[in-house]
Amino acid sequence: MLFLIAKRVLTAFVTVLTVIVLSGILIHVVPGDPVTAMMAQSVTATPEVMAEMRSQLGLDLPVWQQVVLYASHVLTGDLGTTIRGNEPVARLLFERLPNTFALAVSGLSVALLIGIPLGFLAAINRGRLADTAVMVIAVLGVSIPGFWLGLIMIQVFSLKLGWFPVAGSGYRNIVLPALTLGLTYCALVARMTRSALVDILAEDYIRTARARGLREHQVLFVHALKPALISIVTVVGLVFAYLMGGQVIVENVFSWNGIGRLAVQAMLERDYPMIQGFIVVFASSVVIVSMLIDILYGFLDPRMRQR
C-alpha cells in the first residue's frame, strides 16, 4: 500500500510540474506581443513603460530561461503579480479557492444524492419502464447546457418565487449554483452506477446469494454495493474534474466569487500572470483529487495495490 501511495504522489508531482512548464510556455503560444495586448487600453503605454513591463515579466530573456524562472517561482509559491492592481496572484486565487471547493463539493453531493439512487433504480429494473425513464433523464441531463439551466434556476427560484438570492457568496447563495452543477452531472453518475450494478448483478455470487434466500435489499447493499463502490469512486473523480471546469461558467452566471470568475475577469483584461496562475491552481487541484481517489482505490480493491 505504501508503494501505491508513493507511486501516485510521484505521478501527481510530475503531472503538476508538467502543467507548470506548459503554463510558462503559454504566454509565448498566444499570437502577438503579450505586453502590447495587456497595455492596449492604457494611457501610459509608452515605449519605456512597455519595456519596463517586458523586463518585469521576464519577457526579455530567452524562452527556456523564462520557463525555468517561472517554474522555480511557482514551486516556491510565487505565482507573480497581476497587471491590474499589481497584487499577488497567489493571494487572490487562494482567497477564492475555498469558495470554488465549497461549490464543487456541494454540486458533487447533489449529483451523488440524486444520481446513485437513480442508477440503482435503473439497474434493479433493467429493461423496464423505470430503467427507460432514468436513461431518458440521464440523456436530458447531459444535453442541457449548464449556463441555460442556471438562468432558468434564477428566473424561477429567484425572480419569480423569491426563495433564493440572485447572486452573491453567502450560504443561501450556494443552493442554486450547487443544484445547477449537481443536476447537470447527476446524469453521468446515474449512468455509471447503472452500468456497474448491471454487471455486478449478473455475477455468479449474486445468483448464489439469491438462491440462499437472502432478501433483495441484503443482496444489493451487502453483496453488490462494495464492488459497485469502485466504479462510483471513479465517477466521483470524473465528476469533480467536470465540476471544476463547469464552475467557470456557473460562477459567472451566479456571480459566485470563485477562481473561475476571477479567471474570466483576467481573460477579459488580458492579465496573463493571473491566467497562468489559474491554470496552475486549477490543474493542481484536479491532479491532487485524482491522486487521492487512486489511493482510495487501493483500500477498496486489493488488486490495485499491485499496480
Image (cartoon, rainbow, N blue to C red):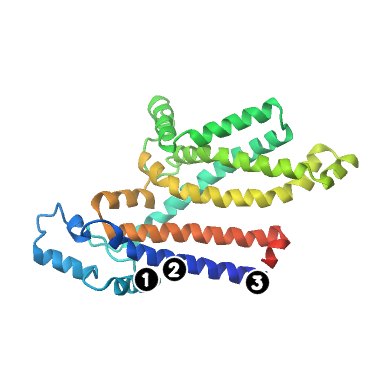
Number of numbered markers: 3
Tell me what residue is drawn at x 43 percent, y 66 percent: 18
Residue 278, how many percent across, how many down?
Answer: 37, 57
Q: Residue at x 45, y 42 (%)?
A: 174
Q: Residues within 10 Å of mark 3 (few under 14, many from 20)?
A: few
The label on residue 2 is 3
**Where is residue 306 shown, x and y percent of the image?**
70, 67
What secondary structure is marked by label 2?
Answer: helix
- Quarter of the image with the N terminus is bottom right
Q: Position of residue 24 (x, y in %)?
A: 34, 65
Q: Which residue is mark 2?
A: 17
Q: Is residue 44 above or below residue 261?
A: below
User: What is the three-letter code of the residue carrying label 1?
Assistant: Ala
Q: Is residue 258 visible?
A: no
The residue at the point 34 percent across, 60 percent down is 276
- Cα separation, mark 1 vs mark 3, equals 29 Å
Q: Which residue is mark 1?
A: 71
Q: Nearer the viewer, mark 3 or mark 2?
A: 2
